[in-house]
Image (spheres, grey):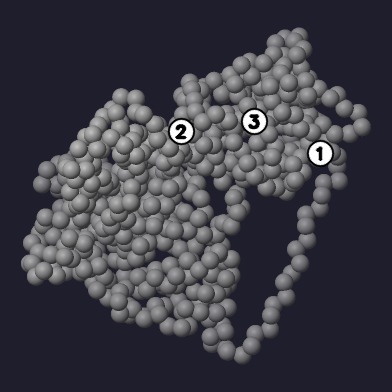
Amino acid sequence: MSCQSIIFPFTAIVGQERMKKGLVLNAINPGLSGVLIRGEKGTAKSTAARALANLLPEIDVVANCPFSCHPQREELMCEECRHRKVQGEILPIIKRKMRVVNLPVGATEDRVVGTLDIEHALKTGEKKFEPGVLADAHRAILYVDEVNLLDDHIVDLLLDSAAMGVNTIEREGVSFSHPAHFILIGTMNPEEGELRPQLLDRFGLCVNIEGIDDTKERVEVIKRRQDFEENQVRFVAKWNEEEKALRELIIKAQGLLKDVVLTDDMLELIAKIAIDMEVDGHRADIFMMKTSRTIAAYHERRQVTEEDVREAAELVLPHRMRRKPFQDRQMEQEQLEQTIQKHKKQTQDPRPQTPEKKEEKEGEQEQKEKPNAQSETIFNPGSPFRVKNLNIAKEKMPKDGAGRRSKTTSTDKRGRYTKSTLPEGRPNDIAFDATFRAAAPYQLERKGLRAQKLLIEPQDIREKVRDKKVSNLVLFVVDSSGSMAANRRMEAAKGVILSLLVDSYEKRDRVGMIAFKQDKAEVLLSPTNSVELASARLEELPTGGKTPLSSGLQLALETIKRELRKNERLATLLVLITDGRANVSIQKNGKPFEEAKTIAHQIKELKVKSIVIDTERGFVRLGRLPELSEALGGRYYPLEDIKAETISNLVKEAII
């Protein structure tokens, strides 16, 4: 065995028992549709995925099949292998180890699903398929690191194939299908952005993991890693017995799974848990049923118990608890226990139960003291409202990234085919329909009809123009000075920000947040895909002190320049929320508001779109912000005008 092929043993991984359990359950029952592992970096996520593949027994495959088809089970065969078997051919069999197929974050659709050679099909009438990642992943482990950073449509393709067990490719009227049964393992760091709830729901299981806090266990992690690096062969041999025992347990559980019984009583418990935990749809119920049966098989039992259902709920429900963006709903262990105990009591005593009276919760008393401009007060965000459109870039200029916000012309093979064009240089994405139309009028003179084939000349070639939607950067610059506490301006301002954050969440924008108060500005959140972090920072934002407006704009200018150095085509929207009562300057003895206007002009020169939301209220107003908005080249909105019926077009109007 070469050093390069030696894998850290699965059973040698310290701690992270729930993650390992989720992986093993999927190995026993691939019908669980994969496991999503959410956690910080350095918590053995990728190590565990590779170790699982090394742990699993070898499989029989058809020797000369590109899809590693099962030699006996027709549902796991491609069309050609099924045809060969029907014709009476004895399929050649070889054994191979379980593979781990990695999906790169920047993978295109063609790389994932495979491609069809249209030219070969036209000339010969035969389908020629070039396999993609899903073909390699059939009867293997598909490992997707940073799944939350993939394009949404790529994630949709993966999850659809995982659910259906089939990958279908259609190109210019030619289609091809092949089996795609795989164990899907996705990993992500929530701080880098979340998956949409609709996609989260497609993963059967979800495990949240954290770094180990126990000193002894952390020391053991170090020791085992050191031993492995010093002598890999000796270390693997040391864990052979544990690996063999777990492998045999998995094989036995796979055979036992079909015989596991789930009684009506346990089905009723599953339904009650789903209802009490207020999950949407019925997918949670179905996966709890599948998972509880798999857990029973893992424990070598033929009937599902209450404990199996409890453990299944802990794996199936955590990523299905949240109903709206930023709604903080964790797995409520106490609620789960109450449901189980209530069901047990009803089972033991079938007499009708008297409904328990719900205690009315009294709201917290409002602070009677009027906030002081020099003191710090934290206001809860006001109620958010719906934002309909936020299209920052008017022109369809090429931009990088992925998202669901602004349309852009794709520079790769990702996106929707919208039209064709003459290629500049060698084409890499041929528009066959347009090419055929361009060649058709010249077939007689090219003798195409007599040759009974279509003759294509270089001048006929057309290339596809694809559109895709990309995300943008939305940078919030928030006044958190003491004057924002008056008349609860900050409460209303936070409601506006939260409304825009909900929209950014749905469109997968990157967001950043800058706050200014006292005598300086600070970056609360560097530009990130995790708008949930922005929401958390917003809720924690206190109000108090003076108003260094120019410092806030200066820090915004520096942040935007830094982001543009990374990507000069980045579309950016600056959202400034303030009452405009600037009273602190950057320069000694400077004029605060004039200083802010000067910096605003510099931001305008970067062609950054902006909107200014004026939170100033009361009978006496300074009314400075329309002037500042003009300096920014943006749109101005008084806070009282931003209602549900106008917020829907606020940002759209600002950037057209």
Q: Secondary structure at mark 2?
A: strand
User: Looking at this view, is 196 or 590 the one in front?
Assistant: 196
Q: Secondary structure at mark 1?
A: helix
Residue at x 20%, y 38% (from the top left corner): 447
Residue at x 72%, y 28% (from the top left corner): 635
How busy is the neighbourhood of tag 1: few (under 14 within 10 Å), some, or many (20 plus)? few
How busy is the neighbourhood of tag 2: few (under 14 within 10 Å), some, or many (20 plus)? many
* The C terminus lies in quadrant: top right
Q: Image height check: is 646 above or below 157? A: above
Q: Quadrant of residue 602?
A: top right
Residue at x 47%, y 66% (from the top left corner): 283
User: Looking at this view, is 578 or 39 the one in front?
Assistant: 578
User: Looking at this view, is 235 or 64 the one in front?
Assistant: 64
Q: Which residue is mark 2?
A: 409
Among all residues in the image, which is located at the extreme top? 589
Q: Quadrant of residue 297?
A: bottom left
Q: Amino acid at mark 3?
A: Ile
Q: Secondary structure at mark 3?
A: loop
Q: Return the x and y of residue 281 as percentages of the image width and height.
A: 53, 66
Left or right: 189 in relation to 331: left
Q: Amino acid at mark 2?
A: Thr
Q: Which residue is mark 3?
A: 656
Q: Return the x and y of residue 201 as percentages of the image width and height.
A: 48, 58
Q: Which residue is mark 1?
A: 640
Left or right: 504 in relation to 23: right
